Structures are given as structure tokens and as C-alpha cells.
Image (spheres, rainbow, N blue to C red):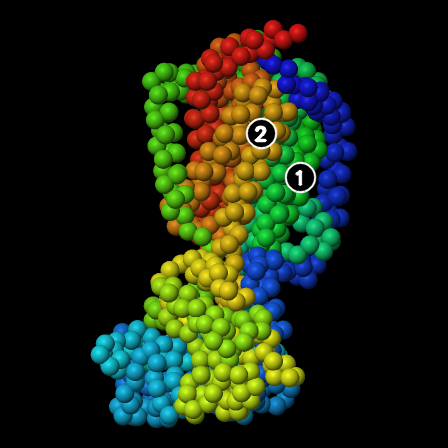
Amino acid sequence: MAKCRTDCIERPLRIFFETIGHFIGAHPWWFFIAPLILSAGLGSGFYILKDKLSNNIEEKFTPVDGQAKMERKYIQETFPRDESTFSSLRLSTDGTYATFIASNGSNILTAESLQEILDLDFRIRSMAVQFENKSFEYTDICALVNGTCSSNDILDIISYNASNINLVNLTFPWYYSDIGSVPLYVSLGSVKFNKDNSVIENAEAVRLRYYLREDNKTKTDLWLEAFMNLISNESMSNSKVSYATSMSLQREFERCPASIVQLFSITYAIAVTFALTSCWRLDNVRNKVWVGFAGVLSTGLALLTSFGLLLFLDQPFVMTVASCPFMVLGIGIDDTFIMISCWQRTRVHDSVPDRLANTYREAAVSISITTLTDALALFLGYNSPFGSVQAFCLYAGISVGFCYLYTISFLGAFMALSGQWEAENRHWFTCVKIPEDPPPGKSKAFSVCCVGGSFDRVTDKTEIQLASQFLEKFYGPLLTQKWIKACVFVMYVGYLAVSIYGCSTMKEGLDIGNLVLDDSYIISYYNDQKQHFSEYSYNVMVAVKHPIPYWSEEGQKSLNSCIANFENLNYVNSTSAWFLSFQLYANANSLNLNSKQAFQSHLVHFLAFNPIFQQDINLSANNEIPSSRFFIQTLNKTTMKDMLLGLRKTAKQCPIKLLVYHPAFIYFDQYTTIMDTTIQTILVAATLIFIISLFLIPDPFCSIWVTFAMCSVVAGVAGFMALWDVSLDSISMINLVICIGFAVDFSTHITYSYISSSKSDINERAIDALAQLGYPILQGAVSTILGVVVLSLSGSYIFRTFFKIMFLVIIVGLFHGLVFIPVFLTLCGGIWEVGLKKCKQIP
């Protein structure tokens, strides 16, 4: 085939690998034993695995430098927590707490149902927990308000007497009493009330919370454990109970890695079985069963070495890294099949070093391209702002590198040893020399079991497998028919349309409930919370970050303008603020607040009667107010992303310098980065992959198609991922990064084989490429799918998502490699030939 002069790197690289292959073929034992020793040494790093586990959800699954984390630091420094006057509204974190939801399908505000809740509440408060040979109760560690434990409003309203529910007219969402207004939307869920007077008619759920001090973590953890044990063994006749604690999510998340160990064992067994089965040959000498097994072993050694090395280098091991072996196993087996395919096309009577040299000459460049693109995509993903993605990409990238090195060394050495057995015509299992042809008088059973070593005596090559014959004689010629090409083109247009539609429906963000196993008790709590308490969302802090004249008309006008802007948002319900309460206090007492001196003087008296507001004002020594805060109640009328961005935008537009914050914003910050980071990674990867393929594939035409295939596969996977109910989050982003590498693999093998073909006709080159590498590609795809299919049975969203996206990557990539790309190469090949002819004329 005529070529433009773009093989200045590819050609010497082929020669280099040919030399390496010849050397390994001449000295196989060196390259067989050295990886075993290296793996044994570095693999010992697994002994320190427990010390390197790092599964903190906030640290690893939220943006490392998220804006909300900086905002939280400001809140904590400016408005320090007052342990003597606890307020859940003013927490800068989720706090330390235990909670339960009691619900039924009708009305829980009955004397019978409330009595059961009160009995449970009593048992929780009086529960004795042992610590250092002493017992303590809730009252010993509870969060305090004016010297007593913080309480639950609904129980205070009925004075801890269930029969009082019939004497009280509860109003929703606020209940007003002599002691102030109470937000009942926090305690009561699925409420029906009279629209005229807001009196509650019934409610289906009651939620109680028990907040604890944070001065002794050991004691609080023991109490929370006792709480969970108590609730898990409780049963109510009138209600069902779901529960959670502040440590539940983290504890349940840490259960996930253990659930995957058994699945990986099954996966490895399946991979070994498939490798042995697909490498089986009827020929007792040229059987490649042991080479297939060596390929799986090589991948295992690469994982052992890379993981151990990184553990020794003090790299944290995040749970997402547990998905890495499933991916690397597929890559390693795919490379094994490519190597075996190229070995079988060498001349039987050549020496083993020459056969391995020719194998490396044909296979090593193709494998190098796919390895380089896989590793490149992963290392690009390391720039992600999520610690979980960074850890995965680092472990996976290093593993892919070692997998490549072990394929070249360990697997190549084993192929050379296997080649020596072939040269001596030894049986693949018994290693005994056997005849090529059955001796006269021997039975058919003897011929099947004890005869082998046949080959094509005309070409001096191993006989072509049935699968490759099918691709060469039937599938390839059929695919290159004009009407089939037209059908493939229409199919691709349909594929692209569905992909684009899917991308337009993609959701963003990680639901933290997806981080735990499906059988976790907190799933029930999250479901009840979503069902009964979803109308009202977060009570968001708004911090005024610089001093303003609160007493002047100008200052009040600016504040009122900002509050009005917030309340004009359809998902903001109300505002509560110390300065609004102060104004009401002043009006009730006929106080004049129009001067700075009067404002400061009356403020001191106001705070004495309302000490809770002291936590909202940062007072200086001379009673100046450098900063303060107020609160806005939001509703569930929009997505979390739109709410977060909308509140921040509104705060930025205010003439006063404001900051909006809620502890949940730490997790919502992913919405501000995940899409941009993913798109940026894909675009940079596409550019670099085009440059790499341009240098390593000796034809710019094919480099363009490799890059096109990558973009097409990623678009398809993203679209079908969204249609399969998978959101774009830090988990799926990992898989899309993997997708970038895998998207190149199949298309690279086909395009490289196409451009390397000696055929002159474009259709014949496509057929030749399919005949040579179509079956290894199919083997690699099936092995990868088998490697991840068991993850579909996982009880973890993380690993099920990995399965879904890997399944899509392989199926979509396989269609591109075996259907779309061969057809597109032939469709555009005629046009390219004209350019090639002109290129040949260049002196």
C-alpha cells in the first residue's frame, strides 16, 4: 500500500521490538523469572493495605478544593460553635446525632401511635452504655440548650403525653406558642392540613433527632452503636421505624470493599476458564491453553506489583480502586490474544527467536498504541478534583503500565518456551514428544490424544482457525457489499441520534445514598425521608462578610433588597434573621434604632433576652459588627445544582458581600465541576490520542479514524449510560475515563492492521484486517465482559455502575471495531487514495 512519509517513528519502533523479541526468544528464562521475583518483592506491599485504606466520603467523593469547603472554613472561624446553646440550624457540619422516622400509611398523630413513639424515646434516653467500667446515658453526652438536652419539638408541644395530641391544634409548617415559633416541617412528614387556618388534619410520619456533644468521640460512638442495636431490635404495632446516625453513612460505605472480594475471585476464575477455552486447539502440539493461562497470570502479577509499589509509596487506597483489577484483567487478556494471533501467523520452521521477533514486530506496536492511550487517558483523569477518581486513575494507570511490561517480558518469555515445545513437537500437557501423523494401525483415540503438530506445508504457517476463516470468507466479503455498507451507515446515524438524545437527558451528581450497599438499613431511612420530608429542603446560611450600617436606611435597604432577591427565587420559602427579630423587638418596645449608638446599646439588651442570636453576630470588642448571618429556608422545587448555583449567583449580585453555605453544599459542589472536568478530559485526550496515533500509525487517514472512533464511542457510552439511569458523578466519571482508553483499543487494532495490509484493494484490506485481528478483538471483548459481568450481581451502586459502563464500552467499541470502522475505512478509502498518489509524488 502506498503511504505518505509518516512512519518515521513506527518503522524504527517495529525494528526495535523485533530486536527485543529476538533477544527474549533467545533468553526466555531471564524474562520469565525476573517478573516473578519483582512481583514477590513489591507484592508484599499488600501487608500494609489496611493502613493505607482511605475511604472518607467527604475527602474522596467531593471536590478537593471545593468552594463550599472554603466557605465552611470561613463560617467556623467567624461564627464559632457555642456548646452551651446548641442549635442544629447553625451547625457548620452535619453534627453528631442519631435519628429515626416512625411512619404509617394513614395518621401517626393518634394517641396510640404517639405513645409507642414516646415509649421508644424513653428507652433511647434511658439507655445505659458502658465506658471504662462505668455506665452513662443520653443526658451525659447530649447537646445542651440552657443546661438541658436539646429536645424534639413535637414531643415538647404535647408535653410528652400522648393524650395531649387531642388538646392541641397543630399548625403547619409553623406552630406558634408562648415560647416562640416552631418549625413542624422538621418533625412531621406527609402532612395534610386545612388550607384556611393551617391546622394539621393528619400526618404520616414523625422524625426525632438526638444530637450529641462532640467532646468525646469514643463515648458518642459507643452511644450511637447502642442506639442502632436498640432500634434494630424494636418493632411497633402501629408504625414502622427506619433509623440512621451521623456515622452510619461512613460505616456502611466501608462495608462495600469486603463485598467485592468474592466477586473478584469468581471473575478471575471466569477469566482463566475463558482464556483456556478460547485458546484451545485440537492440535495437541500447537494448543495455546498454557499461553492463555500465562496471559491471565501475567495480568495478575502486574496488578500485584503495581498495587504493592503504590502502597509502599504511601498512596491511599480508595474503594474505587477495587474496580481496577476488573479493567486491567480485560486489557491483559486482550493483549494476550493479539500476541497469540500474531505468533500463529509466523513460519513454523523458523527458529523460536525469529518467530518471537516477527510476533513482536506485528503485535508490539499495536499493543503499545493501545497501552499508551489507555494510560494517557487514566493519567489525564488524575487531574480530576475528586480524590476517588485520582486514586483510581493512579492505580489503574500504573497497573496498565506494568501489564504492558509483563506482556512484553513474562508472557513473551512463556511464548518462547511454548515455542520450544512446539519446535520439538511435544504434547501441550504431557510434554512428551509425539508424532505429527498417526502411526499405522493406531486407533482414532490415539490420533486425537497423542498426535499433533500439523501445519500448512505450503505456507509453512499454522492452519487458520475456523473463526478467522469465517471472518475472511464470509463476514468480511459480506460487510464490504455496497448495500450492507449503506445499511451500516444508516445504523450509525441511528446510533448517533440515540446517543445525542441520551446525552441531552443526562443527570449530574452523586446521591450519597448510592455509596452504601443495597441491603443497608439507612436505605430505608433515606427512602422514608424522601417520601415524607421532601417538600422542605435546606435551611441555608447567608453570611454578611463585611460591616454595614444596620441602623441606617441605606443599610436596611441593601439588606431588604438582598432578602427580596432570595425570596423571589421559586425555591426559597422564607427568611429568618437576627436583625428582623431585633426590629420586631424594637417596634414592640417603641425603641429608636436609627443611630449607631442606640442600635448598639439596644442590641446588647436584645441579645440578653435572645442568646441564640449571639451565634449569628460576630461582635468586636467595641460592639462593632464585622460580620453576621441570617437564614433562608429552601423548598424542593428544583435540582440541587440549580439551587446551589442560583443561590450563589443571587448572593453575588447583592450590593453587600454575601456568602451562602450549608453542610450539604460540600457534596453539591460536584455539580459545579463534574461536567466541565469530564468534557475537558475527553477533549484533551482526543487531541493527544490523535497526535500519538499520527506518529505511531503510518497513515494520517487512519489516525483521524482512530480519534473519530474514540469520540464516537465516548458519545455513545455517555448517551446510553444516561438512558440506563446512570448519572454523571465521580463514579461514572472514572468509567468514562476508562472508556477513553478502551474506545481506542479495538479501532486501533483494526486500523493498524488495515494500513499494514499488503492488499491493494481497499475492500480486500478491510477483509484482511478483520481476518487477522477480528477474532482476537472478539476474544478480548468477550473476556472483558465476562470479567465484569459478575459485578452486575453486586449490592453496591459503585460496582454495578462500573459493570454498566464497561458493558457499554465493550459493546459499542466492538461495533465500531468490527462494523463501523471497517466500513468507513472503505467508504473514504477511495478519496484517500487520490491524496496518497499525490503524496507519492513528493520528492
* Residue 587 seen in the figure: yes
Image-based side of 302 in relation to 669, left or right? right
Q: Which residue is mark 2?
A: 690
Q: Residue at x 56, y 79 (%)?
A: 617
Q: What residue is at 44 percent from the left and 83 percent from the top?
A: 583
How many residues crowd mark 1 within 10 Å: few (<14), some (14–19), many (20+)?
Answer: many
Q: Is residue 481 left or right of residue 285?
A: left
Nearer to the camera, 157 or 115: 157
Tell me, for residue 401, which label it has, or none: 1
The residue positioned 61% from the left and 80% from the top of the image is 624
Picture layout, residue 618 above or below residue 504: below
Which numbered circle lies on residue 241? none
Q: Nearer the viewer, residue 103 or 199?
A: 199
Q: How many marks?
A: 2
**N-terminal of the two: label 1 or label 2?**
1
Residue 322 position within the rendered picture, expressed as x and y whole percent measured from the top left: 57, 52
Could one spot residue 359 in this view of the protein? no
Q: Nearer the viewer, residue 429 or 140?
A: 140
Say which of 196 and 140 sits in front. Answer: 196
Residue 598 against residue 450 in the figure, above or below = below
Q: Quadrant of residue 76?
A: bottom right
Kind of residue sitting beneath label 1:
Gly
Q: For the N terminus, give its image quadrant.
A: top right
- Camera-nearest label, 1 or 2: 2
Measured Cα–Cα span from mark 1 to mark 2: 20 Å
Residue 218 percent across, percent down from the top left: 62, 79
Indicate the secondary structure of the residue bearing disc 2. Answer: helix
